[in-house]
Image: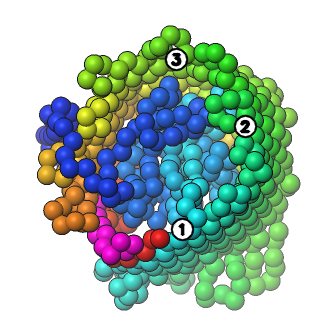
């Protein structure tokens, strides 16, 4: 897209928003998919206590269950793709994508489910395509360092998934959909991808029970039909989850949350064999995650209350390189990770203060073993040998209401790691708010905080042995924690008459002691291999401005805009950090048509050109992607839906580094029933 077209796109969005901020609301629908959301009605936990979204001093964005259903998202990856300023980038070496916030990559963004961390499938980044959205009530996104509230790995921000707690005596739903990538399908099947999900919930005065199942299965796709490779996996992903709650009294309840995830995926790759030519190699990924969470809560939110939160999680992953021409699996890597966590939190409102304080202890372990097989032998290499990490943390924050229009939120967290030592992470947030005579509200938010990230077990102890390809990646037990200072500022206008809103914010993140792998020349010479070792050596800065707006229009239309201007710089070389576009635009248009129950949605995303390497020699061209959605509700409990993802059919060049979308145009159709 040319500079002129890009400018026109951003200007059109801003003009529409500014023009209609004074408009009265149009005929508001009772359909939950198209009803205009009131921020006072959304409760969030971004400050570790439940608050109305319009009242939180820490800037928080929310994706609601209605947003997820309206866009037909099948997993967390698809649910987050329209969030302003948020990037989804492929995880190196496996399928799936991680979350980048304010130019900070997925290794430094914390993903939670009901406040509990999720194990990273690669030891560093959480794969968002592994998380189903069937039982999600909302997704909360906090941008900027949140370590004082949530601990290590929250340097870039936090994505907290809140699961649904049903209030009806009986609730149930089932949804089925399927679609095709057209000419890129590996098989001649109009349902090359299939998705089935359902849940049932039972509730009475003392008990509640919820069971969710979500299955995704596909035949794969290829953008290079004349090669042996396929870029879209063949296989399935399965999520099972339950929530069981018993209320001893109105103010004392126990919740158990077991979850299971399983995947079995295969991608074909082409490999050159001397004397033979190109041969096919199947890259296989098998994952099983078992999770059990338990939470005991006592008290009401307006009085003294406490909670104990515990979790245990086991992750088992197997990756393999298998040449079908041989009778054995040539290379296999098995990863076993375990995580246990216990958190105690107290909330104590007194006068103009609401104190939250508590502690957390956690332990994690990792084992990684690689097998290399030939027709004559099997070599077993221990890459991580029962590595463990133990942490103890204390935290405190105070919501202090200074008069009628000002709230201060100071806080800190002390983190102790047996290897990395003790770290203090302070923060200070403030919000000035005022309600005008018209009922409109102005919010001004300011915040500064310290982010930190303790080196993970992979970075400390991993021995990634690819000697057959001429290199190894080595861990480093002597790494220091990463650290950052994050500055956030924003002003927000909430229109009372029609729930229109506009927010302008600015951010800056200064990061030091970044951990990256770099070549160890002395060790390389000694082993006659390229030896890479994790080290603290990088410094970076990300800064920018973000505009977010929503407004109802005439004739059943509503419009939303997200625009981010960002600079991301390597402070050592002065180069731009790769894969960070200077301009990111996200637009949405909903139309509640005159036909009752029919909602049409268009979502557009534009990314400006961006470097693909740290030396700033190669660029991904600017691109624009358009998604089209349709929902039709009929017969009280039924709806049908369809859509076209990537209608513009923009796709990356798989022969080189390229940040354009991997998947081309995808057309699908589905039906759902809800009681």
Q: Earlier in the sequence, mark 3 or mark 2?
A: 2
Closer to the camera, 113 or 270?
Answer: 113
* Residue wearing tag 1: 171
Left or right, 16 with reference to 137: left
Give above or below for 317 relative to 28: below
Label 2's element?
A: loop
The disc label shown at residue 407, or none: 3
Q: Earlier in the sequence, mark 2 or mark 1?
A: 1
Q: Residues within 10 Å of mark 1 (few under 14, many from 20)?
A: some
Evaluate whether residue 491 shows in this view.
no
From the image, give the main secondary structure of the stretch colored magenta: strand
Evaluate whether residue 262 shows in this view.
yes
* Residue wearing tag 2: 299
Label 3's element?
A: strand
Q: Quadrant of residue 215?
A: bottom right
Left or right, 255 with reference to 284: right
- Residue 129: percent from left, percent from top: 53, 61
Which stretch appears magenta?
627-641
- Residue 646: percent from left, percent from top: 30, 63
Residue at x 65% of width, y 44% of height: 115
Considering every residue shown, the one lying at the far top of the view is 403
């Amino acid at each position: 897209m040319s500079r002129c077209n890009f400018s026109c796109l951003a200007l059109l969005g801003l003009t529409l928003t500014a023009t209609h901020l004074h408009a009265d609301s149009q005929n508001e629908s009772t359909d939950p998919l198209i009803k205009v959301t009131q921020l006072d009605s959304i409760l969030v936990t971004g400050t570790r206590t439940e608050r109305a979204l319009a009242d939180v001093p820490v800037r928080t964005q929310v994706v609601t269950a209605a947003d997820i259903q309206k866009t037909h998202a099948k997993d967390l990856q698809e649910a987050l793709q329209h969030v302003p300023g948020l990037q989804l980038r492929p995880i190196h070496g496996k399928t799936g994508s991680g979350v980048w916030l304010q130019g900070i990559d997925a290794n430094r963004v914390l993903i939670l489910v009901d406040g509990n961390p999720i194990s990273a499938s690669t030891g560093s980044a959480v794969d968002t395509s592994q998380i189903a959205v069937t039982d999600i009530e909302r997704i909360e996104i906090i941008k900027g360092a949140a370590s004082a509230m949530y601990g290590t790995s929250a340097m870039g921000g936090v994505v907290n998934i809140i699961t649904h707690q049903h209030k009806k005596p009986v609730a149930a739903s089932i949804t089925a959909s399927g679609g095709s990538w057209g000419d890129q399908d590996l098989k001649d099947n109009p349902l090359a991808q299939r998705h089935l999900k359902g849940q049932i919930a039972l509730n009475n005065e003392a008990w509640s029970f919820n069971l969710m199942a979500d299955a995704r299965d596909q035949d794969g796709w290829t953008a290079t039909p004349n090669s042996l490779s396929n870029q879209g996996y063949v296989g399935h992903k399965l999520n099972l989850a339950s929530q069981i709650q018993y209320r001893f009294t109105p103010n004392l309840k126990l919740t158990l949350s077991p979850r299971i995830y399983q995947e079995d995926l295969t991608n074909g790759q082409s490999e050159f064999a001397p004397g033979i030519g190109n041969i096919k190699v199947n890259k296989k990924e098998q994952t099983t995650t078992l999770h059990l969470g338990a939470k005991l809560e006592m008290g009401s939110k307006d009085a003294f209350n406490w909670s104990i939160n515990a979790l245990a999680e086991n992750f088992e992953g197997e990756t393999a390189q298998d040449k079908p021409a041989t009778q054995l699996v040539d290379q296999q890597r098995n990863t076993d990770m375990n995580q246990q966590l216990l958190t105690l939190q107290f909330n104590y409102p007194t006068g103009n203060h609401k104190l939250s304080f508590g502690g957390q202890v956690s332990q994690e372990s990792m084992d990684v073993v690689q097998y290399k097989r030939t027709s004559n032998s099997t070599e077993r290499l221990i890459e991580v040998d029962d590595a463990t990490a133990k942490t103890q943390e204390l935290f405190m924050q105070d919501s202090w209401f200074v008069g009628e229009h000002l709230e201060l939120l100071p806080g800190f967290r002390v983190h102790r790691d047996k290897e990395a030592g003790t770290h203090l992470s302070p923060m200070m947030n403030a919000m000035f708010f005022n309600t005008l005579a018209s009922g409109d509200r102005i919010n001004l938010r300011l915040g500064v905080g310290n982010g930190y990230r303790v080196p993970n077990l992979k970075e400390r102890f991993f021995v990634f042995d690819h000697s057959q390809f001429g290199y190894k990646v080595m861990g480093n037990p002597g790494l220091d924690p990463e650290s950052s200072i994050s500055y956030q500022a924003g002003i927000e206008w909430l229109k009372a008459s029609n729930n229109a809103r506009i927010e302008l914010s600015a951010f800056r993140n200064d990061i030091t002691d970044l951990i990256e792998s770099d070549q160890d020349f002395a060790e390389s010479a000694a082993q006659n291999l390229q030896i890479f070792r994790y080290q603290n050596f990088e410094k970076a800065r990300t800064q920018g401005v973000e505009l977010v707006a929503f407004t109802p229009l005439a004739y059943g239309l509503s419009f939303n805009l997200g625009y981010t201007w960002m600079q991301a710089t390597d402070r050592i070389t002065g180069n731009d950090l790769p894969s960070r576009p200077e301009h990111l635009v996200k637009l949405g248009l909903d139309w509640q048509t005159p036909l009752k129950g029919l909602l049409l949605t268009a979502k557009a995303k534009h990314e400006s050109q961006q470097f693909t390497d740290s030396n700033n020699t190669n660029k991904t061209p600017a691109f624009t992607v358009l998604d089209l959605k349709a929902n039709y509700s009929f017969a009280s409990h039924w709806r049908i839906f369809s859509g076209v993802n990537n209608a513009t059919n923009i796709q990356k060049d798989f022969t080189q580094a390229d940040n354009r979308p991997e998947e081309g145009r995808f057309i699908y159709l589905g039906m759902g029933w809800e009681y």
